[in-house]
Amino acid sequence: MLIDFDRINIKDIEDIPMSPRDIFMSLPNRDKKYDYPRDVQTDVWNQWFERRDNSKDVIIKMNTGSGKTVVGLLILKSSLQEKKGPAVYVVPDPYLVKQVINEANKLGISVTEDEKDTDFLRGKSILVINIHKLINGRSVFGMRSSGNVIFQSIIIDDVHACLNTTEEQFTIKIQKDDIKYSEIFKIFMDDLKNQSINKYLDIFNDVSHANMLVPFSAWQNKLQEVNNILYDHKDDEDISFKFPLLRESLKLCSCIISTEQIEISPKSIPINMIASFQNAKRRIFMSATLADDSPFISHFNIELSTSESIICPKNADDLGDRLIIVPAEINSQIEDDEIKAKLSDLSKKHNTIVIVPSSYRAQYWNNVADIIVDATNIYQAVEKLNKEHVGLVVFINKYDGIDLPDAACRILVIDGLAEIKSGTDKIEQAMTFNSERIQNNLVQKIEQGMGRGVRSNQDYCVVLLLGKTLASMLYTDNAIEKFSVATRKQLELSQQICSQLKGKSLDEIIKVFDYSLGRDEQWVEKSKKVLLNLTYDRKLNVNPITLAYRKAFDMAEIGAYKDAIKTMEEISNQVDQESTKGWLMQQLAEYVNLINPIEAQQILRAAIKHNVRVIKPIEGIEYDKRLKKFTGVGNQLVNFINENNLDENKYILRLNSILENIVFKEDAAPQFEEAFKQLAFYLGFCASRPENDIGKGPDVLWQINDTEFLVIECKNGVTNETICKHDCNQLNGSALWFENYYNFVSASYTPIMIHLGNGFEYACSPDSNIRIINMDKLNLLKETVRKFSLALVDNGNFRNAEVINKLLVEFKLDYLGFLNEFTVGHKVKNTISMVKQLTN
């Protein structure tokens, strides 16, 4: 070799590239596929480089498939060039770690998975890890007494996909068979009884999925006892990685005790426990273009001072095209079985992805699925889909973190709403049933799921949104407005197409798929134009309630209780919605209890006036015995329709959503009970949930008319057809409750149990008047209600009180008709039959 290039020094004549784009262009070993950066990448890099020192925290929003990984790697490489290292790239799971490393290798950027790597520590290489590695109670990034790894720059990619892991790491879960469970349960036994004796008995008797919130006054008063238990077991596998994260925030935690476990979690994530993350000079959060930015605040406590901290491409037209169809909105008579059969046929030609919320729902698709995917086989399934035609593939609760470009996914199905997993969210939903925060989370899951099928602006797929509850949320609760701007535009375009299909058969709806799948020129033109010149929303969209939670938590953590109280007072005064106001007043009372327990109980008493489901004050509350004065059921239903601004379409959508939740299913008691209560109003009756509202009485109480009632216990989570003694005693007790509470009127009532079977076990002593709604009768009731609803919205009947009264009798939905048509008598199994059952 004639020339020794190592002897040539060009430092004096060469400028070291600093901006991400310049670095990209100067990478000597990048793969040929990276000849030039995309315009959208250059746009984001330039914005970031210009503003990089304006704010500690920056959010980068880019549509799925627009090259976020390359953008992130070059931003961290730029930070290293500026001596802002070490630098860390964080992704949701180990699979994505490998993807980022592969991308970096193709670019020729040095990366490592080892936090001890000297090149990483010297700021020469980027550390790539998953979120679990960053956030845990033994994290090398701040949870050790010495030797913690310090970094200056960090990117968290797919932020919304990291949320669940972050929550899990800051949540202690203690299973029922653990000694810690019985010790903690014993501490709060009396407090739970005072809240609701029946719910306590459900937990005590192992009734599936029963849960209760420990009253905050009891939690704060007995916190030292709980802390002692946790400390004594701090090395146990289930809490060793979590207790260190929460030990300083236990007083600001909620405790949920359920039949299966005890769950302890904070009101906001004390992310400051991860010291290196808290003290990093540059924190960049990368996400898809979702509409709700609240998790950035609640989980990562970002510091955003101006809208300049949000970086987006100039235009939002880099999204692939999606034809979005909601069958329940087009024709409410189309059944899931029809759709499943059609999709099974279509999957023989097109890879069809179905995202379901749970293993329970996956069973529904089992007979047509080519693969059912869970955590054990997800990576093999994704790889297979990206290589070949597979057919119909069902993903369980996987709304993010997977890429299915091009032929890997041509038809994408979101089957129903994601399930609420955390105990605190379940409690909030049970107490409010219209929590905007939770609704935002559900919409976010839908949008994340919809993003799996289009991974570039040249990609395309048909999206089906299934489920009557999902359809009702979209079209009657105005959830469409909560999607990102690009998704909203695609939904609006799809709605215009679907409006021409109103009432059509499923076969006719399926034909419309060909416009997208066959790349019809008119469809492609409209699909592209609808995104043309569309710009991203650069505002920080944070739910004010989430922001208040964060501020109050941060103030309370440093002992500024009065400031925390003021924050919660302000937000509770701003809210008009009654159940949410009551819930916020409960949160306020919890902070007040830290300095003034007497005033806290007074706030709780005031909160109950807005929401009877909140925690009961120590001295309890009075049940409102006032009876609804009926002017005829027909008039009552007309008034209900008018008060709730229902038209025929909204009435059908909401009623179908209610019926969808009236099913025999484990872990669905609150939804079932609320749905059965709401059903009464959609038939012109009145209803309440006394046991949920005041801790006493039946699950649901229907008032059919002035003097006739149904006292209903809902056992939709049972798996055995025999009715046990506990459930029998509960219904007997509810009947006695009704007699005591309504002894001032000449009211007649029928005790009803919703249960798989109508046979009580031998030890039971059921009231002789008890009637049973078994599975067959429940299905008959639902089918009859559907027929009633169709008759109601037909031929001008909708607001005709006289016709409504006639329809109720015709469909046997009056008091006597209901009992005769939709309930059966009961029996008590004798000793001989019980012996036969046991021997069999």
Image (cartoon, rainbow, N blue to C red):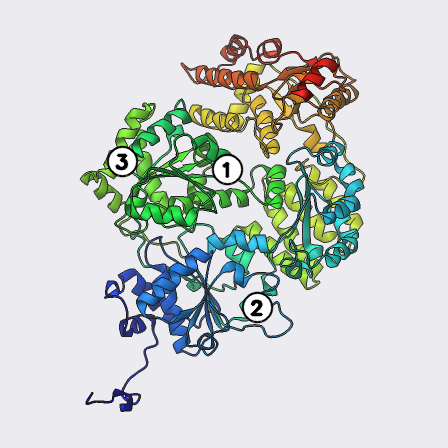
Query: In the rendered image, which quarter contains the C terminus?
Result: top right
Amino acid on which the number 2 mark rests in the picture: Val
Which residue is most to the front?
839
Do the residues bearing badges 3 and 2 touch, measured as CB atoms within 8 Å? Answer: no
Dot 2: element: loop
Helix, strand or loop at disc 3?
loop
Whole-percent x and y of residue 194?
A: 78, 37
Residue nearest the observer in this picture, 182 or 432: 182
Kindly identify the amino acid type of the residue bearing the numbered disc 3: Lys
For label 2, the residue is 140
Judge whether 621 appears above or below 565 on screen.
above
Q: Earlier in the sequence, mark 3 or mark 1?
A: 3
| Residue 540 rendering spot, x and y as whole percentages | 46, 56
566 or 171: which is nearer to us?
A: 171
Image: 460 above or below 156 = above
Q: Which residue is mark 3?
A: 349
Look at 56% across and 19% down and name the residue there.
775
Closer to the camera, 138 or 716?
Answer: 138
The structure residue drawn at horizontal position 38% and vertical position 33%, both measured from the top left corner, is 326
Q: Quadrant of the N terminus?
A: bottom left
Give the alpha-carbon distance from disc 3 to disc 2, as whole Å.
49 Å
The residue that mark 1 highlights is 359
Three-letter residue code for mark 1? Ser
